[in-house]
Image (cartoon, rainbow, N blue to C red):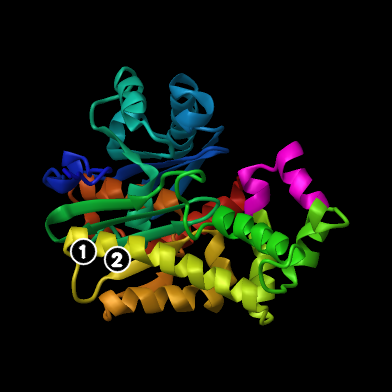
Amino acid sequence: MKRDPLVRLPGALTHPKRASADARYLLGVDGGATKTLAAVLDMDAGRLHIGHGGPSNQDAVGAVAAVRALLEAADEAITDAGISADRLAAAVLAIAGTDTEAIVRNVRAIRADDWLVVNDVVAAWASATGAGPGLAVIAGTGSNVFGVGPGDVPWRAGGWGHLLGDEGSGYWLGIHSIKAALSDREATGPETALSERAPAFFGLETVEQLATHVYSKPLTKGEISAFAIETAKLAQAGDAVARELYLRGARKLGRQIVAVIEQTGLHGSFPVGLIGGAFKAGAVYVGPLTEVIHERAPEAGVARVQLPPVGGSLLLAARACGCPERLRPEELARLIDEALAVKPL
C-alpha cells in the first residue's frame, strides 16, 4: 500500500526564508470548533496582543464562516498591537477540521500569500516540541498523534473520529466505561463501581436507564467524554475495571505513537508532548503510556505540554520568518497566560 504522511508541513516551514533584520511582529491563530484565539507577538518589546473569534472549524460551520472567524480574531489582535497587517513578518493560522485546502483558498483570496494555513495538529506539535523533532500526542474529546523527524519528515496516526478511531481519548474512555457498567449489570463482565457512578453522573437512577438515555437523548461526544473524569477518579481509587480501561487506552494510543516514531525516523532523545484533558487522570494513564513509548524509544522525554496551541502557531511563524531562536516556549507561555488574564476567552 502506498502511504503518505496525511498531514504535511508547508514549504515555508521546511525551507524558511532568510531572517530579516527588521522582523518584529508575528501572528499566530488557533482555530477550533467552539472558539478562535489569535495572538500578535512584538518580539522586540516582548509584548503579546490577543484577539478572539467564534468557531472556525470548517466541519462545524463551513469554510466561509470559518475564515470569517479566523480573520476577525486576527484583525482584532493586529489592531490591538497598533500595526497594519503588512508589518507582520509571518502569520500562521492553525485550524481544526478535515479540509484545510478549502480554508487556504478562502484565505488566499483575502490575505497575502505568505499567510500560512496548517492543520491544528501541526501547531500542537510545535507547542510540544518547540517546532523541532518530536511528537505531539493529543487526547481530549478525540485523539491524534503527529510528529516530525530528522529532515522534517512528518507522520500522523489517528484522528479518524469517534466512529473509526479516537483510541485513548476522553470519548473512548467514556463510552467504554459505560459499556463496562452494562457488562457488570448483565454479569458478562467484572464488578465495578462504574455501575453506580455512571447513572448518577447523568442524573439517572439505574444503569438500564442510562442505556436508553444514550440513544434517546442522544448523548453527545462531549457529554460522554466528560464522564471519563469519573473513570479517572475510580481508577485512582483502585477500581480494577477503571484502571484496566486506562491501561487499554494507553496501549492503543501507544501503538499510534510508536508508528509515528518509526515512520518519521525519530531516535535517541526527543520530546513526546501530551496535550488534552484525558491526561489529567495522571499516573494511571501517563504511567502505562510512558512504558509503551519507552519500550520503543527509551530516551524519549514524555511530559504534559504547558504551552497553549496558539503559542505553537507563533513558534511556527518564527520558523517561517527565519528567526526561531528568538522565541523561548517558556517565556511565550508566560506572555500568553498574562494576556489571557487581562482579556480572557
Residue underneath mark 1: 262
Q: Which mark is residue 258?
A: 2
Q: Is residue 176 left or right of residue 184?
A: left
Is the residue 55 above or below the residue 26 in the image? Answer: above
The part of the image, by quadrant, that contains residue 71 is top left
Query: Which residue is outermost to the top?
Result: 109
**Viewer-closest of 50 and 31:** 31
Is any part of residue 282 visible from this angle? no
Q: Main secondary structure of the magenta part?
A: helix
Q: CA distance from mark 1 to mark 2?
A: 6 Å
Taking the magenta stretch, the answer to whether it contains residue 81 is no
Tell me if mark 1 has few (under 14), some (14-19) or many (20+) residues whose alpha carbon lies within 10 angstroms of its own. Answer: some
Is the residue 296 above or below the residue 10 in the image? Answer: below
**Viewer-closest of 256 and 113:** 256
Residue at 29% of width from left, 66% of height from top? 258
Q: Secondary structure at mark 1?
A: helix
Taking the magenta stretch, the answer to whether it contains residue 212 is yes
- Numbered range of the magenta stretch: 209-225
Name which residue type carries label 1. Answer: Glu
Q: Secondary structure at mark 2?
A: helix
Name which residue type carries label 2. Answer: Val
The part of the image, by quadrant, that contains residue 274 is bottom left
Is any part of residue 216 visible from this angle? yes
Q: Position of residue 51 (x, y in %)?
A: 51, 38
**Viewer-closest of 83 and 213:** 213
**Image quadrant for the C terminus?**
top right
Q: Position of residue 197 (x, y in %)?
A: 78, 65
Is the residue 57 above or below the residue 18 in the image? Answer: above
Q: Position of residue 76 (x, y in %)?
A: 49, 33
Q: Which mark is residue 338?
A: none
Q: Are marks 1 and 2 in contact (CB under 8 Å)?
A: yes
